[in-house]
Amino acid sequence: MSKDPSKVFSMPFSRVYPLYLQKVERKGRSKTELDEAIRWLTGYGQEELQEKTSDDTDLAAFFEQAPQINPCADKVTGVVCGVRVEAIEDPLMRNIRRLDKLVDELAKGKPLEKVLRS
């Protein structure tokens, strides 16, 4: 992703989602698992999430409209794109990178229960 946060924030979620899906499916994970991870982080229901994957909602609006960021989201730590997730000051960028981290963990074969910090 771009270094300019405004470019990332304005990227349509419907453009990012298929990339996440490709990444997890390439590693033998399912759309169901990906959707569960996204719902865990954002509080969206499956129907709302499906709408977001096909409309023109950008990443900023996707997270701003999220019903509730999971209270355990701060347990999503580690490095994504060379940056520590927990060190990112901008709350929106931190949530975007948390989602990237969840997708990475799924793709690396981590059990869903661990990805979801249960």
Image: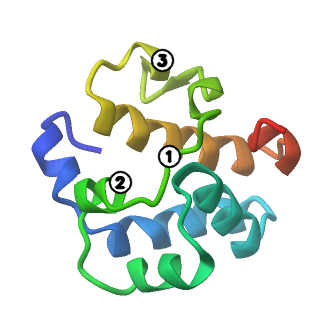
Q: Residue at x 35, y 54 (%)?
A: 63
Residue 69 circle label: 1
Q: Out of 97 and 63, give the one closest to the viewer.
A: 63
Question: Crowdedness of circle 2 by 10 Å Cα count: few (<14), some, many (20+)?
Answer: many
Q: Which amino acid does label 3 sit on?
A: Glu
Q: Is there CB contact under 8 Å for labels 2 and 3? A: no
What residue is shown at x 39% (from left), y 43% (from top)? 96
Mark in the foreground, 2 or 3: 2
Q: Tell which of 59 and 73 is nearer to you.
A: 73
Instruction: Please name the residue that numbered disc 3 is placed on.
Output: 86
Question: Residue 38: percent from the left, percent from the top?
Answer: 58, 59
Quarter of the figure that contains the N terminus: top left
Label placed on residue 98:
none
- Against 90, residue 70 (above or below) is below
Q: Residue at x 56, y 85 (%)?
A: 47
- Amino acid at pointer 1: Ile
Q: Which residue is drawn at 16% across and 58% down?
A: 10
Helix, strand or loop status at disc 3 = helix
- Residue at the outermost top position: 87
Residue toward you, 2 or 37: 37
Q: Where is residue 82 in the image (x, y as percent from the top left)?
A: 43, 21
Residue at mark 2 to residue at mark 1: CA–CA distance: 8 Å
Foreground mark, 1 or 3? 1
Report how far apart the C-alphas of labels 1 and 3 lie in the structure. Answer: 15 Å
Dot 3 crowding, Cα within 10 Å, few <14, some 14–19, many 20+: some
Relative side of 77 to 2, left or right: right
Are discs 2 and 1 less than 8 Å apart at CB? yes
- First in sequence, mark 2 or 1: give its number: 2
* Drawn side of residue 19 relative to residue 59, left or right: right
Mark 1 or 3, nearer chain start: 1
Report which residue position mark 2 lands on.
63
Disc 1 and disc 3 in contact, CB within 8 angstroms: no
